[in-house]
Amino acid sequence: MNHKYHRQTLLPEIGEEGQEKLRQAKVLIVGVGGLGCPIALYLTSAGVGHIGLIDNDVVSIHNLHRQVLYDEADIGQPKATCALHHLRPKNSDIELIAYPMRLTKENAEALISEYDIVVDGCDNHATRYLISDICERLGKPYVYAAISAFQGQVGIFCYNPDAPTYRTLFPDEEAMLAIETGKGVIGTTPAVVGSVVANEVLKLIIGYGEALLGKLLIIDLLTLDIQKILFTKCHPERSEGSR
């Protein structure tokens, strides 16, 4: 086993068998911005064998306080290709593919069909509905995440035919699409939430712990309140919280 993974393979929940599962896994990250950067960093470092990075945006100076893969020299360049450029030196064992394009109704099914898990690093509701619909159709787990200001959400959809989807959580698409996105956020919010997302992906691949199946995790970094909302394909059932 490659020595670079020694410390994580010491964990009985992972071991060499878990590391081999990571090597064989294929994960598509949709959006390589504030959330996508830490997700991509940790999945790359953990040894996920095949990672796709899709984003049609370019690096802007106002991205740099939270999108930790990029630096000032990247301004004006495509995020997907810049992300690949910065990730490649971190792990030569894995395959990284950049898609400097938008995920659309025309290309989503073909792209998603090539991967085992789809991870949400995007910043708009339309893309999330699209990911959820295609993942539900293809039977691919969809690891959802969203951030705003000091708060973040994480959940897992479409993990089996009876699993909830993004539409379960937000059934009124028209109302969601009318909500303004791109509001303020502190850089630590995507750092914390993105790390949680990366860990949920590792759980799905290896099978350790209790993944957020049928649960929505809500994290408030102002108060450090953490809440879980449990829901089925029909509706949310109850919630539990901690401080």
Image: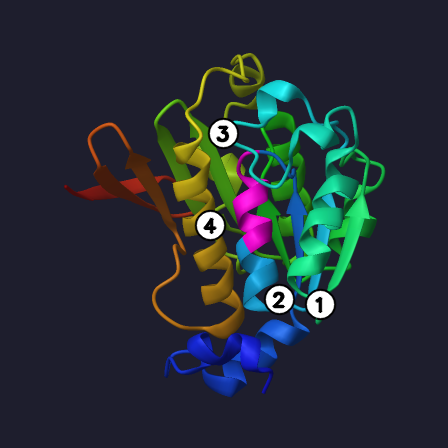
| Secondary-structure class at tag 1 | loop
Q: Which residues are magenta?
A: 34-41
Disc 4 marks which amino acid? Answer: Val
Pointers 3 and 1 in contact (C-beta within 8 Å): no
Distance from disc 3 to disc 4, alpha carbons, whole Å, reads 23 Å
Residue 205 location (% of width, % of height): 54, 69
Residue ID for mark 1: 94
Distance from disc 4 to disc 1, alpha carbons, whole Å, reads 20 Å
Q: Residue furthest front?
A: 73
Q: Earlier in the sequence, mark 3 or mark 4?
A: 3
Q: Quadrant of residue 97?
A: bottom right
Residue occupying image coordinates x 78% and y 33%? 78
Residue ID for mark 4: 197
Disc 2 marks which amino acid? Answer: Val
Residue 112 location (% of width, % of height): 74, 52
Pointers 1 and 2 in contact (C-beta within 8 Å): yes
Residue ID for mark 2: 48
Residue ID for mark 3: 171
